[in-house]
Image (cartoon, rainbow, N blue to C red):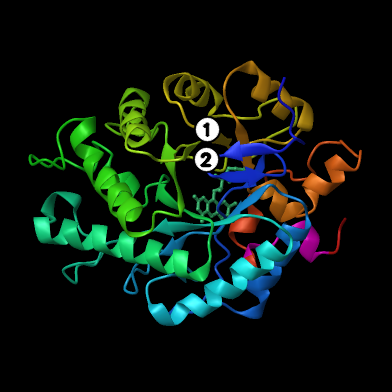
């Protein structure tokens, strides 16, 4: 029997419970990647709220990546100190923290959002270097790990998708070819920063014509597991489904995560639509899924884990309205209006 509130091993990390804060873009950093005070407060609230581990909002590995406004960055050494402070805030509460490393668009040849098919071998080498250098900075800042963002149509997600990658070389073709870039990045990070826990967030399905299918995602996950990735977080396009209700339509990527957990020998983390402790514990005991990650419920209630642990186990208050995508600092509209 697995419980939410028990210590559990996530690769080389020990978590106080099985709840993880899934990456949530705050939209607060400036163009260079400097992080304002408000952003540190987000992490302070989360860490004090009792979650088992925190994955930061997407953090660009490149300084010329302008995919989304307010992206944090870990693309230059001068930013390490600011990340050190964020890590310190989490560690003060004994909460492990991982930086989500992302590339939104790729500007390698001054072209915005460059076509995957047009990338030269040198361009691909540059992408690998960007991720490895970012991971080294993450290690210097004291992060416990890094997560490669290969979901939600970000660059790595597009690269593994047959809808975007029609390359004929070793980085294209079948799932093994399309997954090679992720594999090369993983190997690069393992060589350069061996202490780091390395995980990935990956689409189980692109849910679009000609996109990544579950069979292909499974092959890529298996490759990464064989190459030593420590955990895999399962997501998909259409990532933040609206109108989730406890006991009705929770955990919308569960089926794939159960299959994946039977296939690989590493912890599988499932994100998307967890709103009740009953459902979450049922999922943990339905198969081999080890951890559950949440985003919007922790925007609404950063102290949700403590609330549940202290005995108030009513469902998460998040109504999945998705207004947090639009508010300043991606705060919850209810919290902004002072509604408890
Ligand atoms: C405001 C907001 C920002 C998000 N930013 C990220 C992000 O930076 N990286 C990421 O992988 N997913 C991001 N997501 C997706 C969430 O991590 C999560 O996968 C999705 O919302 C489903 O989980 P939930 O039902 O617990 O919210 C974001 C979601 C929201 C609502």
Residue 11 badge: 2
Task: Give yes or no for contact between labels 1 and 2 (Cβ–Cβ under 8 Å).
Answer: yes
- Residue 55 position, x and y percent, is 56, 54
48 w.r.t. 253: above or below: below
Could you tell me which residue is drawn at 46 percent across and 70 percent down? Answer: 140
In which quadrant of the rendered view does residue 60 lie? bottom left
Callout 2: CB less than 8 Å from ligand 1: no
* Image quarter of residue 2: top right
Q: Residue furthest bottom?
A: 78
Q: Would residue 233 appear left or right of 91 to someone viewing this image? A: left
Q: Position of residue 336 (x, y in %)?
A: 77, 65
Q: Secondary structure at mark 1?
A: loop
Inspect the magenta stretch and tell me whether residue 333 lies in it: yes
Q: How much space separates mark 1 and mark 2, taking CA atoms?
A: 7 Å
Q: Residue at x 52, y 40 (%)?
A: 11
Q: Which residues are magenta?
A: 330-337
Up-down relation of residue 155 to residue 180 (above or below): below
Residue 324 within the segment the image draws in magenta: no
Mark 1 highlights which residue?
267
User: In screen coordinates, is 100 left or right of 115?
Assistant: right
Inspect this view and state whether residue 280 appears.
yes
Image quarter in which the C terminus is found: bottom right
Mark 1 or 2 closer to N-term? 2
- In this picture, residue 200 sits left or right of residue 5: left
Q: Position of residue 279 (x, y in %)?
A: 73, 26
């Amino acid at each position: 029997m697995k419980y939410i509130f028990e210590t559990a091993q996530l690769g080389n990390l020990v978590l106080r419970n099985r709840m993880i804060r899934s990456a949530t873009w705050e939209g607060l950093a400036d163009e260079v990647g400097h992080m304002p005070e408000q952003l540190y407060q987000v992490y302070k609230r989360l860490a004090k709220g009792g979650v088992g581990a925190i994955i930061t909002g997407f953090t660009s590995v490149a300084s010329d990546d302008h995919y989304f406004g307010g992206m944090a960055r870990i693309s230059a050494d001068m930013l390490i100190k600011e990340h050190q402070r964020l890590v310190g805030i989490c560690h003060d509460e004994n909460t492990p923290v991982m930086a989500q490393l992302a590339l939104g668009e790729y500007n390698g040849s001054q072209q915005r959002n460059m076509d995957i098919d047009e990338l030269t071998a040198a361009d691909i080498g540059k992408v690998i270097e960007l991720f490895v250098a970012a991971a080294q900075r993450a290690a210097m800042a004291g992060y416990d790990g890094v997560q490669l963002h290969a979901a939600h149509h970000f660059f790595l997600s597009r690269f593994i998708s047959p809808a975007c990658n029609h390359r004929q070389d070793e980085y294209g073709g079948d799932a093994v070819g399309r997954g090679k870039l992720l594999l090369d990045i993983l190997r690069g990070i393992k060589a350069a920063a061996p202490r780091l826990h390395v995980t990935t967030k990956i689409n189980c399905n692109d849910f679009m014509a000609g996109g990544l299918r579950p069979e292909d995602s499974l092959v890529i996950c298996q490759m990464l597991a064989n190459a030593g990735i420590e955990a895999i977080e399962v997501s998909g396009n259409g990532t933040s489904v609206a109108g989730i209700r406890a006991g009705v339509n929770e955990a919308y990527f569960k089926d794939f995560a159960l299959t994946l957990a039977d296939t690989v020998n590493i912890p599988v983390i499932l994100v998307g639509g967890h709103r009740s402790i009953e459902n979450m514990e049922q999922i943990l005991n339905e198969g081999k899924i080890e951890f559950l990650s949440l985003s919007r419920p922790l925007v609404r209630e950063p102290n949700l884990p403590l609330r549940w642990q202290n005995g108030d186990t009513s469902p998460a208050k998040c109504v999945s309205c998705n207004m947090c995508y639009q508010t300043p600092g991606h705060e919850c509209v209810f919290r902004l209006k002072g509604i408890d």
